[in-house]
Amino acid sequence: MTLHLVKLCVGATSIEDLAAWQRENRQCKTRDGKACVYHPTYQFPKRRDELLDGGSLYWVIRGTILVRQKLVSLDDGTREDGTPCCHLVLAPPLIPVRPTPRRAFQGWRYLDGDDAPPDLKIGKRDQVAVMPAEMRKKLADLGLL
């Protein structure tokens, strides 16, 4: 079973806001030269191999899981103040998922594959995917999605 991480996206108000912030602040390249983004976190996940076997980071934006990014690697890093950290290295595409309410927590949490919200299929067949993001969030908050 695939294992994922879930993390609060503090300060972002939308998927577009997260994308803009990553473009401006967190660009990097993998060892083989591919574009990626990274996010520093204090704790290094102990279940590394499970996470890197197809896992993603699911972002909680304003109390709702809205989007995910594929985990590329978990690297040793250093914060701006010099303290050691883990860099969650992510593939750049932000993949919208079915909005799922999530209570606040600190740091990150493991998310089992069975509990991960499914990707939204962009197209005319998925009525949820074509809704405006704010409408999806409101419906999810009401428990209707």
Image: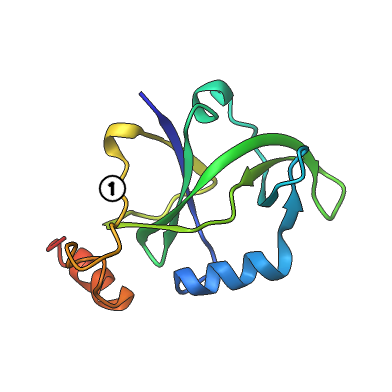
Q: Which of these two is toward me, 23 or 86?
A: 23
Whole-percent x and y of residue 81? 85, 53
Whole-percent x and y of residue 22? 64, 64
Residue at 19 percent of width and 62 percent of height = 126
Q: Which of these two is toward me, 18 or 119?
A: 119
Along the horizontal axis of the image, is 54 left or right of 31?
Answer: left
Residue at 12 percent of width and 63 percent of height = 144
Farthest left residue?
A: 144
Whole-percent x and y of residue 48? 58, 25
Residue 90 in sight from this viewpoint = yes
Disc 1 is placed on an element classified as: loop
| Amino acid type, mark 1 | Pro
Residue 11 in sight from this viewpoint = no
Q: Is residue 41 above or below residue 134?
A: above
Which of the 4 quarters of the picture holds residue 121? bottom left
Q: Is residue 55 above or below residue 37?
A: above
Q: Quadrant of the C terminus?
A: bottom left
Whole-percent x and y of residue 57? 49, 45
Along the horizontal axis of the image, is 81 left or right of 65?
Answer: right
Q: Is residue 12 above or below residue 117?
A: below
Farthest right residue?
A: 82
Residue at numbered disc 1: 118
Residue at 42 percent of width and 30 percent of height = 3
Q: Quadrant of the N terminus?
A: top left
How many numbered discs sit on the rendered protein?
1
Q: Residues within 10 Å of mark 1 (few under 14, many from 20)?
A: some
Along the horizontal axis of the image, is 114 left or right of 21?
Answer: left
Colour scheme used in the picture?
A: rainbow
